[in-house]
Amino acid sequence: MEISEAAIKREHFMPGLNLLSQAEREVLDLLAMGKSVKEVACILNKSVNTVRVQKTAIYEKLQVRNQAQAAVRYLYCQ
């Protein structure tokens, strides 16, 4: 089985990307666009607390400390 260069690059720069749930990816998509937690909650029809919990899980899985780092890693590996 051959692994593509893009897959290797994604795994190198975003080791936790494959660990994200679909819901976390939806949240990350919006956070990467610069949306606030409140805006994300409204768009996805979720509570602000739910989005905060998902955001924390995203940061842990991607091994980042803030929204800017998460966005850069996510957008770079698209």
Image (tube, rainbow, N blue to C red):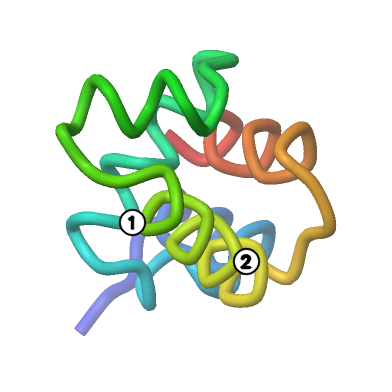
Horizontal arrangement in the rendering, residue 74 relative to residue 22 (left or right): right
Q: Secondary structure at mark 2?
A: helix
Instruction: Name the quarter where the C terminus is drawn.
Output: top left
Answer left or right for 70 relative to 10.
right
Instruction: For mark 1, give the secondary structure.
Output: helix
Q: Please say if the residues under marks 2 and 1 sit with CB atoms less than 8 Å apart.
A: no
Q: Quadrant of residue 26?
A: top left
Q: Nearer the viewer, residue 14 or 7?
A: 14
| Residue at 41% from the left image edge and 59% from the top image edge | 7
Residue that numbered label 1 is attached to? 24
Determine the residue located farthest toward the right in the rendered image: 65
Callout 1: few (<14), some (14-19), or many (20+) C-alpha neighbours within 10 Å? some
Q: Which residue is mark 2?
A: 62
Instruction: Give the mark, 2 or 1, whose residue is nearer the N terminus.
Output: 1
Where does residue 39 sit, x and y in percent of width and height?
Answer: 42, 19
Identify which residue is drawn at 33% across, 56% down: 24
Task: Quadrant for the N terminus, please.
Answer: bottom left
Measured from the top left, where is residue 29 in percent x and y? Answer: 38, 31
Q: Nearer the viewer, residue 20 or 7?
A: 20
Measured as percent of width and height from the top left, residue 51 is found at 41, 50
Q: Amino acid at mark 2?
A: Leu
Say if 66 sits above or below 39 in the image.
below
Q: Nearer the viewer, residue 69 or 35?
A: 35
78, above or below 63, in the image: above
Position in image of residue 48 (x %, y %): 42, 43
Q: Measured along the vertical axis of the image, is residue 56 above or below residue 26?
A: below
Q: Residue at x 73, y 71 (%)?
A: 63
* Horizontal relation, residue 10 to residue 1: left or right: right
Neighbour tally class for label 2: few under 14, some 14-19, many 20 plus, Cα within 10 Å:
many
List the single residue furthest toward the bottom: 1
Total numbered circles: 2
